[in-house]
Image (tube, rainbow, N blue to C red):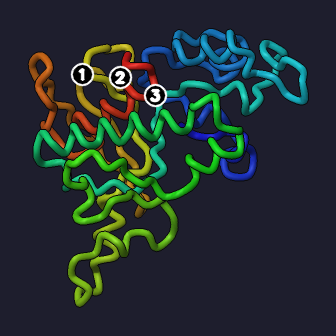
Amino acid sequence: MIDMETMYPEYLNDFQVLVCPSSPWAGPALQLWDEGKNPATTYEEAVAEGHMFLNGVSVHQNGIIEPCEVYEHPYVYFGWAINPTLFQATEDYNFFENAIENLVGKITNPANTTQQCKQYADEDWIFPDIGIPSILASSRQAYRLREGIERFLITDINNPSSANMAQSILPVMWDEISGDEASHFNHVPGGCNVLYMDGHVEFLKFVPQSGSEINKGNSFPVNSGGIIIHEASHHGE
């Protein structure tokens, strides 16, 4: 969920950083993305659909990693501020799943222009009105991550440390997780590392749930909220 063409090389100058050593398909970045030794279905689809072109020329297997080739990596980046404490009831997860499906539908709608799709991915996320209370207090939207966005989560304006506390609970990036496939885990069966907005990293244990039960075992994203994001970006896998 990272647009590599906007990240490389100004903000990320080494693609190997995106490879978790604990990933079941860890290897040299060149092998994963240029040579095609990548088992992910999203990568295979990108190749089949002709997404790996630069200025009209295919760059697949040319010995150089181009940003357009970097499909599917062991880390998940989610660009909206999601307060992990607000996943409490089953309805919260149901709402989140509907909202994600609505968002992905807009971003990937072939009827939209490329510019429209990028705009949907870059603006605040307006939740669809489906008659379920918002997952973000009384808000009907999730804000794009940006400097200062944590103030929208502050409940005690008289507490000078509130801003730091808010940043410390906002997940930005984490190890890939899945509800049922070990191959989608970097750390089987333990859990995943989560990078928070204040810059600290914390390892959260994954608590398996039986059957189709909503996973409330740990804080977002190491619960059904994170699994919903994974499935939405992997066609339900």
Q: Position of residue 129 (x, y in %)?
A: 31, 50
- Which residue in the structure is indicated by mark 2? 185
Give, as a three-letter code, the residue at label 2. Phe
Quick check: marks 2 and 1 in contact, CB under 8 Å? yes
- Residue type at mark 3 is Ser
- Please tell me whether mark 3 sits on a helix, a strand or a loop: helix
**What is the distance, in whole Å, between disc 3 and disc 2 at their CAs?**
15 Å
Front residue of this view, candidates 33 and 96: 96
- In the rendered structure, the answer to whether residue 192 lies left or right of residue 33 reads left
Q: Is residue 110 rendered to the left or right of residue 169?
A: right
Callout 1: helix, strand or loop? Answer: loop
Badge 2 marks a residue whose secondary structure is: loop
Label 2: how many residues lie within 10 Å, few (<14), some (14-19) or many (20+)? many
**Residue beneath label 1, please?**
189
For the residue carrying disc 3, how many other residues have a C-alpha within 10 Å: few (<14), some (14-19), or many (20+)? some
135 sits left or right of 79 in the view: left
Q: Categorize mark 1 by other alpha carbons within 10 Å: few (<14), some (14-19), many (20+).
A: few
Figure quadrant of residue 232: top left
Find residue 149 and report its horizontal and vertical position in percent: 43, 69
150 displayed left or right of 157: right
Residue 194 falls in image quadrant: top left
Q: Name the foreground residue: 20 vs 72.
A: 72
Q: Is residue 208 above or below residue 151?
A: above
Q: Which residue is mark 3?
A: 233
Upstream in the sequence, badge 1 or badge 3? Answer: 1
Number of numbered callouts drawn: 3
Quadrant for the C terminus in the image: top left
Residue drawn at point x = 58 percent, y = 31 percent: 109
